[in-house]
Image (tube, helix red, strand yellow):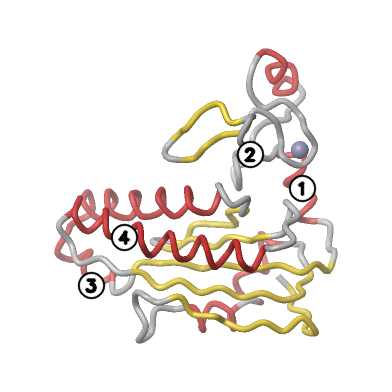
């Protein structure tokens, strides 16, 4: 991606072409593809929306899943008010998204002040678990800048899980079926730490 990166938008470096299929995503040629409905995916701007659909094929693949949110933030929102809460959450998610996208993660969804992302789908990564842990470290270390910017004692909890999973039907069943992962990754008593939420290559979890 290094030679193809052309722009930085909100801290996210954007590739000129889809890192999976090579479809142009910037420049005059990309205009033609946009007319055909092919554009940057909302889950990762460096892949096209056509490759994004590969995540829905119902295959069983090895994935790493990362979940990150701000710790004890619900209480803080009462003091901050809606506008400042929005600014803080937006800055946190922007910083987290940058750390994830540059490691080829796919942003599954934002849930309030939390982000959930996959590694190894749809962008194949031999070292997806290491990439997820590296992203977790950057999300944690990035809080230092946010604390100074907002003059708040912000902390986050980040969970990483790796294993075999059946991917597909993410829109309606993901959150309900993947509750065990989310429970382990909730802040609980460990803000500021990355929690390994388990690695069981023999298990199959329906995402
Ligand atoms: Zn593509």
State if disc 1 and disc 2 touch (CB < 8 Å).
no
Instruction: In this rendered view, identify the residue nearer to me: 25 or 183.
Output: 25
Task: Say which mark, if any, is on residue 75.
Answer: 3
Q: Quadrant of residue 186?
A: bottom left
Question: Label 1 CB, ligand 1: below 8 Å?
Answer: no
State if disc 3 and disc 2 touch (CB < 8 Å).
no
Could you tell me which secondary element the residue under label 1 belongs to?
A: helix
Within 10 Å of disc 1 (Cα), the crowding (few <14, some 14-19, many 20+) is few
Q: Along the polypeptide, which appears first: circle 3 or circle 4?
A: 3
How many angstroms separate mark 4 from mark 1 (CA)?
33 Å
Q: Along the polypeptide, which appears first: circle 2 or circle 1?
A: 2
How many angstroms separate mark 3 from mark 4 (CA)?
18 Å
Within 10 Å of disc 3 (Cα), the crowding (few <14, some 14-19, many 20+) is few
Q: Along the polypeptide, which appears first: circle 2 or circle 4?
A: 2
Residue at x 49%, y 57% (from the top left corner): 110
Q: Is residue 142 left or right of residue 201?
A: left
* Viewer-side label of 2, 1: 2
How many angstroms separate mark 1 from mark 3 (CA)?
38 Å
Residue corresponding to mark 2: 46
Q: Along the polypeptide, which appears first: circle 4 or circle 1?
A: 1
How many angstroms separate mark 2 from mark 3 (CA)?
36 Å
Q: Quadrant of the N terminus?
A: top right
How many angstroms separate mark 2 from mark 4 (CA)?
25 Å
Residue corresponding to mark 1: 53
Residue that sits furthest to the front in the current view: 3
Residue that sits furthest to the top in the current view: 28
């Amino acid at each position: 991606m290094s030679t193809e990166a052309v722009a930085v938008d909100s801290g996210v470096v954007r590739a000129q072409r889809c890192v999976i299929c090579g479809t142009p995503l910037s420049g005059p040629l990309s205009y033609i593809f946009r007319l055909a409905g092919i554009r940057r995916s909302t889950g990762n701007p460096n892949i096209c929306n056509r490759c994004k659909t590969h995540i829905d094929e119902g295959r069983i693949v090895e994935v790493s899943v990362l979940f990150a949110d701000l710790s004890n933030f619900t209480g803080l929102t009462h003091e901050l008010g809606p506008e400042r809460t929005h600014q803080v959450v937006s800055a946190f998610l922007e910083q987290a998204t940058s750390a994830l996208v540059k490691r080829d993660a796919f942003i599954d969804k934002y849930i309030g002040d939390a982000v959930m992302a996959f590694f190894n789908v749809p962008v194949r990564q031999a070292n997806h678990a290491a990439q997820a842990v590296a992203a977790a470290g950057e999300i944690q270390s990035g809080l230092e800048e946010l604390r100074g910017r907002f003059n708040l004692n912000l902390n986050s909890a980040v969970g990483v899980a790796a294993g075999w999973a059946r991917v597909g039907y993410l829109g309606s069943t993901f959150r309900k079926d993947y509750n065990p992962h989310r429970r382990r990754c909730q802040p609980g008593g460990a803000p500021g730490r990355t929690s390994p939420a388990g690695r069981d290559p023999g298990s199959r979890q329906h995402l």
